[in-house]
Amino acid sequence: MEEALCELSLNGRGGQLYSSCLFCCPSQPVPCLLYQHLACYVPKIYCLGPNLNPQNEELLAQLLLLAPLEWYLCDEDPSAGLAKLEQSNQPSQLCGHVFKVGEPTYSCRECAADPTCVLCMQCFLGSVHKEHRYRMTTSGGGGFCDCGDTEAWKKGPYCQKHEPNISDTSQEDPLAHLSSDMIARTRSIFSIVLKYSVDMLTWEKEDELPSGLEPLERGDTYYCMLFNDEVHTYEQVIYTLQKAVNCTQKEAVSFATTVDRDGRKSVRYGDFQFCEQAKSVIVRNTSRQTKPLRVQVMHSSVVAHQCFALKALGWLSHVIGYSDALRRILCQVGLEKTLEGENSSLVDTLMLCDSKMWKGARNVYHQLLMSSLLMDLKYKKLFAIQFAKNYERLQSDYVKDDHDREFSVTDLSVQMFTVPSLARMLIMEENLMTTIIRTFVDHLRHRDQRGRFQFERYTAQQAFKFRRVQSLIGDLKYVLISRPTEWSDKLREKFLEGFSAFLELLKCMQGMDPVVRQVGQHIEMEPEWEAAFTLQMKLTHIISMMQEWCASDEKVLVEAYKFSLAALTHCHGGFTDGEQPITLSMSGHSVDTIRYCVSQEKVSIHLPVSRLLAGLHVLLSKTEVAYRFPEQLPLSELSPPMLIEHPLRCLVLCAQVHAGMWRRNGFSLVNQIYYYHNVKCRVEMFDKDLIMLQAGASMMDPNHFLMIVLSRFELYHIFSSADYRKRYNRENANKDIIQQNNTLIEEMLHLIMMVVGERFAPGIGMVQSCDEIKREIIHQLCIRPMAHSELVKALPENENKETGMERVIDSVASFKKPGVTGRGLYELRPECAKQFNLYFHHYSRADQSKAEEAQRKLKRQNGEDSALPPPVLPPLCPLFASLVNLLQCDVLLAMLGTVLQWAVEPSGGHWSESMLQRVLHLIGMALLEEQQQLENSIEENDVGFNFTLKISRPGEAPSNTPSILALLETLQNAPHLEVHKDMIRWILKTVAAIKTMRERTTTAPETDAVGQSQEETVRDKDKAERKRKAEMARLRREKIMAQMSEMQRHFINENKELFQQSLEELEASTSASLEHSPTSPDTASVCVGPRRSRPSEKRLVVTCILCQEEQEVREDGRAMVLAAFVQRSTVMSKNRRRPSPNPERYDPLFMHPDLSFGTHTGSCGHIMHSHCWQRYFEAVQAKEQRRQQRLRVHTSYDVENGEFLCPLCECLSNTVIPLLPLTRGSKRYHTATVLQSSDLAILCFPRDPYSSSIKEMLTTFGTATYKIGLKVHPNEQDPRVPIMCWTSCAYTIQSIERLLVDEEKPLFGSLPCRQDDCLQSLIRFSSACWTTSSLPSVQNHFIRLLAVSPSLSCISEPTPFLLLSLGTQVSLVLSYSSVHCQDSSGLNVDSAQQHFLQVVTLAHVVQVLLTSIPAETTMDQETGAGSSEEEAAVCLLYGLLRRHLVSDLYEVTSGWHLWRCVKAGVLPYLRSAALFFHHLNGVPAPPELHGKSSTAYLSYTLSLSEHFHKEYRTTEWCETASCCAFFPRESNRLIDLPDDYSALINQASSFTCPKSGGDKSRAPTLCLVCGTMLCSQSYCCQAELDGEDVGACTAHTFTCGSGVGIFLRVRESQVLFLAGKTKGCFYAPPYLDDYGETDQGLRRGNPLHLCRERYRKIQKLWRQHGITEEIGHAQEANQTLVGIDWQHL
Ligand SMILES: [Zn+2]
Ligand SMILES: [Zn+2]
Ligand SMILES: [Zn+2]
Ligand SMILES: [Zn+2]
Ligand SMILES: [Zn+2]
Ligand SMILES: [Zn+2]
Ligand SMILES: [Zn+2]
């Protein structure tokens, strides 16, 4: 059957044939014909059991099902027809690029209408916004590019590509270009296909098909279909599937992955019974705790049609891409109403079934909606209307569904609601605002008996629903995000309708979650509070936006104000319930209020209705009317005491909590108070409560206001009667109560300051909105300099996530760039410091004390007195103008007097300094107010504010207390108030100044006063000048001192190692040229060969860091060891693709010149006795064992693998290197018995001069190197142990040589001590390590090394000659010691060393000639004749090589060119050799040695001519040449990163998981060593490593970095270091924003650019083999890092 189909379809014109016979049959209508066709073929093509050949299925579907449709559509060959369509198409100006998951999106912070307006990368790069301030984010998938949408952008709506041509008439009907015939055909085919697809996707029967589609023959073939849900975990599903359908774990993982991605997957195919059985197992297994997994047994034909339906929708999407006209037709077809009624179009059907469909089906049709309806501006509007009509139903479905919102059709709301014109149309036509709010309220059903929300005891189910309902708030936000510029009456009406719906919502929140103070016992259960605050937080922006809408139209504002007032009055319906009226009187004033105690009755933090009214009140105050005809405002109905009542209670609650009166109410209340003040909530909570108090106070007699405040603070009695005060002082011995009252008084005074002084909201004071932001920033920076992100966090963000900071920051702060670490900081401009207000309302107590300290310090530095008087305030707006009277009202003066009186006669602690400080501040505020009014008034009569007069008057008659001024004068001399003297002095000075001002204006003629004051100021100035100079001098001195100490500190830091160093004498290792100059004078020293200089032999005495004992390093002494870390390394690898060798059989004797893997040894340089170390390590082991028994936590080091932390510096170590003295020219070996070289097996000479403890350490370190380097079990007998030591030594030398070159440092003298010590110990150890292994095997190694020639090298595969390298030379020299004793040739050690050096060097020269000579270029030759001899020689040699090789080598005639290449190629080797011999033989290095002069030190000139005639094996070597390495080896670098981070995001977004066929990777991660992109942190790409499943990154480290890896997690913008399977840490990425900060997690979205210095720092860490160490330190510093399962990344 299938073959026949194939044949038919492959017969080229199959499509045409079909379409002609299908659709041209005149007797039957097209739909029937097509349905017949589908009924016949769909089940034959799709889903014939588990799909083994998807390509075949794909091909058949295209040819048999889709091609006929295309033929019919075009009425000709579709490839031609569709091309024609595309040509005549005039595409719309919308880009419409649909975002993939993780793709970068850009939004312009200056021009975007709202933050949901985004551009794709391509459009962004071609737009004007590239030069603006933009935000970059990664898309969560879905959504499209808004380029070309004029409503989305305030300016620059088009990129270069989508710029419309002027000739283009975009309003034209796209159908105009199409023939009517074509239109008819398209319409017919689209409607059939769409209908079919909709029917199939919404089909719910498992065993039947819609009429017309019944299959011709029906087999017993079923699928067991598993559906996705968000309840069960991956693990649960995998486990269940393994049980239910008998599959392997791998298959189960793959099933689970598909189910998660597509929403469903058939897990079994077979007869009904077979499938039914699997279903019951799955259901049984998953129904225990939760609802079971959804499984259906479906007939195969149903599944087949559903598959094709998806395919058909994809096809529609594809076809309409050719032409806007086709798109328009599809839109028409989709929205066409059928007979069944209003919401009956196909699109409606799809939407309304959305929550019943599986994920895959939803995705496909959402995509189709986006590419059709949302891309056609006309139909977008019609679709939006349908969407709004269905809104309530869709949301209800969504709330019941359990899939994430991105898989719900409701998620499309953002595409329509954020378009301002659409949103406004929907508000007016469909009453959208009201609909959204009502739907929201309907879904929140938990209420108390007064109709308020009640979240207490709500179930998990309800909590889940509550979370989902919140998305409605998002929709409301979209609708409101752009404010109307013009209002129509209809809009006013509908907006106000929405507004009152919103008030209904707020009414349900007013007073929710009330609390009652707990006395006696602590509360038993923390009450639920988070839900209410979540709601508040989510609504915060909405509330602000509502106010802004109101503000844009005066009529709306006034109406909204009235509504809110009515709502508030309604809420206060039971205002006086159980609250008896009382009368308060004080200082001759009295007021009626109620009896109410916050500490005894219910109080709630949630007062959104009052706060909304407060917000509107401020807006009213800004209107024209408020200035001209305030009587027209709806203020007459206000009852100020009612307005302030609840906000005041809330503020008192906060004060009481601060005073510790609510301790027994637990943390939930503390948290609520915290959020109440928090930047995220305060705008619509704390700030508005304060405003409400200001509004109330401005409409009341200030004395009345203050009395009510006193009463609510429960402080009325203390202040109202002196008798009570006395009794209270006498009786109240209870310290707690006194303490509480003190705090309450402080809080109350602070509140009064805020009510009078907080005038920076426009509408309260005469300020601009930018003044408000400036003030916030100033006060933040008064605490300390801050980074950009810290400031952003401290400022409230608006609905567009903007703080407005950028507009003002430069006027108040200056920016300081960061260094290689840290971040950029803003510092307050000095001139702004005078605006500092110690009692700034947004300071927490901690902020306040930090700011106070900082500002006092600053003042002292500037040589000023330390008083921090209040700043000068802006004037109040008319509606609030009367607030200033609070400062001079009788009740306040009485209160101030009382506190001052207490301060004068302190007794029994009823008084605190903070209280006094606040009183002084208040007095200061009043004085400044008076001063300002005087300055601004033309005539003195205008100034009704006369504070100075009032404070000069003594107290009232009966008690005759002294005046406030008198009290202050007394206090000025009080010894216990030293801190406040400056402030008191400032007050008295100001009082005097005001008096002068008043006198001047009243009595003295003006000129006189001016003259006098001028005189005065001149004198003052003089004094000030002198003082300033003295101060300057003092400051200079201080600065110099500070510089000195800074330098000292810096020096110590720089030379930390030096200071920590416990080696007392190690001159031999450091350059220390000074010391050597007498012994080895100016003549160049030579480190190898017969002419070798004398080594500096000094006793080496070191101190053990553990026992602090000194010890000389001697061969026969106690062993001293260095903590060391041995690791495998590929840092210098030139070939990362070479598979790592089999550790059991690998022969490490020849280190491959591509250095593809090596063993590196490093050390922190700390020395211990071997026995001290052993004891320490045993203790660590024991501790670790105990710990593992107790709790299964990991440590940052792996004790079982011998790891430990250096006891001094906590550096990760895994072994120790013994310290050895200098071997003295191997003299002692001369006394050994001379043997015949044939008798290698016999050993009978004293070959170990070392003490047993040293021998033990030699074995320890040798075995560790062997074990780690080869990744094998330790075996000290293995003959490869010494080889591993030698090669590790050579590798480490080479790595250090490279480091020095990279950092352009000299070869000697520039290494830090720790590296120098490590290198020396390593080399000396390597020269001695053979003594602990079997002599014959070492000698065998030597012979093999010496015999490097093709004829002898049948053992190893790659030609050994090419493997000759530093490793060979090191090994040769070191193994020679073992042979030397038996060498009868008379060669002494020095000559032998020189000989080996020469042999290997020559070999290396040949190597260079064979591999690294580039073709000649015409370069300028140096015309120095100096090296002409060498040039000739090298030519000769090269010629020789070419002759033997025939081809392969370029013809090079220039000796100069060859010589230059050889010199460059050999130099690194020679430098390494110099390092080696320097440490081996202990010959001091010449001080200026670097670069070429190393040859002299090696007593070796590269004079080829000397060696040439020997023709050393060169002919044989040549034959084996093949390019395997290029010399000089370039140092490896980390990969190049793009400057712009979004380029990386873009790269990562197109990266697909390499294992699961085209899926997006969730955590694309870039290897910075080799540039491979990996699919990290995901099941799909786990690999098995040593029998354990590990993530892609960990697996990669083992092939790329032998266990160590450096990655960039692209989505997170985070560097990841990994080492081994269990270690890892995160590291700051090398990308910074313009403010010098990294953005780990990409949360802020500022553009990021590469910081090269930081990247170099990471590279250096890598080259130094410091990654593992860095991880160790990070984990020690942050224990939570230890618990992370790094191997899963
Ligand atoms: Zn675009
Ligand atoms: Zn564009
Ligand atoms: Zn812009
Ligand atoms: Zn010791
Ligand atoms: Zn250390
Ligand atoms: Zn993957
Ligand atoms: Zn890599």
Image (cartoon, rainbow, N blue to C red):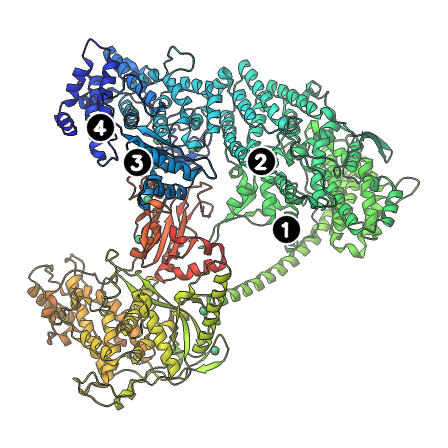
Q: Which mark is residue 268?
A: 3
Q: Position of residue 1161 (x, y in %)?
A: 35, 68
Residue type at the position of mark 2: Ala
**Dot 4 and dot 3 residues touching (CB under 8 Å):** no
Check the image and name the residue furthest to the top: 27
Q: Position of residue 425 (x, y in %)?
A: 47, 17
Residue type at the position of mark 4: Ile
Residue type at the position of mark 1: Lys
Does any atom of ligand 6 lie closer than 8 Å to the CB of label 4?
no
**Dot 2 and dot 1 residues touching (CB under 8 Å):** no
Residue at left offset 18%, top offset 77%: 1343
Check the image and name the residue furthest to the front: 273
Which of the image's four quarters has the N terminus?
top left
Residue type at the position of mark 3: Arg
> Looking at the rendering, which quadrant does residue 1586 occupy?
bottom left
* Mark 4 or 2: the one toward you: 4
* Mark 1 or 3: the one toward you: 3
Mark 4 to mark 2 CA distance (whole Å) = 53 Å
Neighbours of disc 3 within 10 Å: few (<14), some (14-19), many (20+): many
Going from the N terminus, do you reach mark 3 or mark 2 first?
Answer: 3
> Looking at the rendering, which quadrant does residue 224 occupy?
top left
Residue at left offset 58%, top offset 21%: 501
Going from the N terminus, do you reach mark 4 or mark 3 first?
Answer: 4
Q: Secondary structure at mark 1?
A: helix
Q: Which mark is residue 531?
A: 2
> Where does label 1 land, which residue?
850
Mark 1 to mark 3 CA distance (whole Å) = 68 Å
Q: Tell me: residue 351, above or below residue 804.
A: above
> Where does label 4 land, which residue?
45
Q: Position of residue 1084 (x, y in %)?
A: 29, 79
Mark 3 to mark 2 CA distance (whole Å) = 44 Å
Q: Secondary structure at mark 4?
A: helix
